[in-house]
Amino acid sequence: MKNYTVTLPNYSIGPNCYEEIGAVCTRFGKRAAVVGGATALEKAGPALRQGLADAGIEIADWFVYGSDATMAAVERIVTAPEVQAADMLFGVGGGRAIDTVKAAADMLGKPFFSCPTVASNCAPVSAISVIYREDGALDRYYFPKGCPTHCFINTSVILDSPEELFWAGIGDALSKGLETQLASRGKRLSHTPLMGVELGRICEAPLLTYGKAALEDFRAARLTDAFVEVVLDIIISTGIVSNLVTTADDYYYNSSLAHCFYNASMVLPKVHTHLHGEVVSFGNLVLLAADGRDEELERFIAFNRSIRLPITLADIDIVEHADIVRLVERASAMREWTCVPYEMTKEKFTAAILKADAAGRTYLARSSGE
């Protein structure tokens, strides 16, 4: 038995949640550097500036992080003199912006506060940063010493975000229960990962129950219970699970074949036009096909189709067999390739991809005939 530390998310949510900045942040200092995406800083800017001003927190710096979560972008933040002089960092935007600032704050040893402007993944509360290479391919996972100090989920700002990011976020969140259960199957789980895997089971039902209604409410700019339930599921529920099932060294049950499919697909430039959660949602089908769970595969295909998430390879612009060969070759070298309770081979993964695609095409043919 050795010492270990687990950090879990603290968060404020609501249309005026930046009013809570004073109550949460002032004990950490009086100077903040705010870094995020260009559009995110524009959308959240007025309310966030007001929240900081009301809290008596000076803005030491305010700038755009870059355009992707790369180590170069992290280094630009770490070496900025105004950031180094700040007491705390705020990361504003989507997953890649927040992951970038999160990693920089950890390197600097400063408190980090996330302000998601979209609900597309659990980056705002997770203790992991996904870092990409300059060409868009996956580079590495960076593990901060803990999750963000606090997350401010302004639902009014998120309601003003691109609909497709919220839509893709549903697909990404649906992977959490599937992947944690598969990756941990057959393992002797100690307290913390066991708690995470069990909590992962509750990520699915709210999405399947409220997902379609939440999207309709989003389009109508209605701040409803269904919308908030899905936002909390995408950001908080999956983030808590991630923090409980992930360590840098001892165990990693956070991802499996769905994210293996997505990460490997980044070797195909044409897939870069599709969103992370969009591609992961097809990866969910690949996981179910590989695991022989045909009834669940049909259920997930039906749900995906109900909100127009991908159910065939063509939906994500993979139409050549050579593309599948490249994807599978890349997948076989990834960490997630081994996050299954049995040996994974290139032949098995290829068969699972083709099976998921065939099931999706069959569903389309059947639906068009009804």
Image (tube, rainbow, N blue to C red):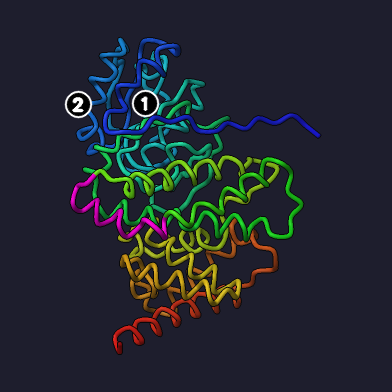
Quadrant where the C terminus sits is: bottom left
Could you say where residue 346 lies in the image, as x and y percent from the top left?
59, 73
Q: Quadrant of residue 303?
A: bottom left
Are discs 1 and 2 less than 8 Å apart at CB? Answer: no
| Residue 114 located within the stretch drawn in magenta | no
Q: Which residues are magenta?
A: 207-222
Mark closer to the chain start, 1 or 2: 2
Could you say where residue 61 lies in the image, as x and y percent from the top left?
29, 19
Amino acid bearing label 2 = Pro
| Residue 208 located within the stretch drawn in magenta | yes
**Looking at the image, can residue 149 be seen?**
yes
The residue pinned by badge 2 equals: 46
- Label 2 environment density (alpha carbons within 10 Å; few <14, some 14–19, many ≥20): few
Quadrant where the N terminus sits is: top right
Give the residue displayed 34% in from the left and 75% down from the top: 314
The residue pinned by badge 1 equals: 90
The image shows residue 14, relative to residue 23, as above or below, that is: below
Q: Specify whether 79 is left or right of 67.
A: right
Q: Quadrant of residue 92?
A: top left
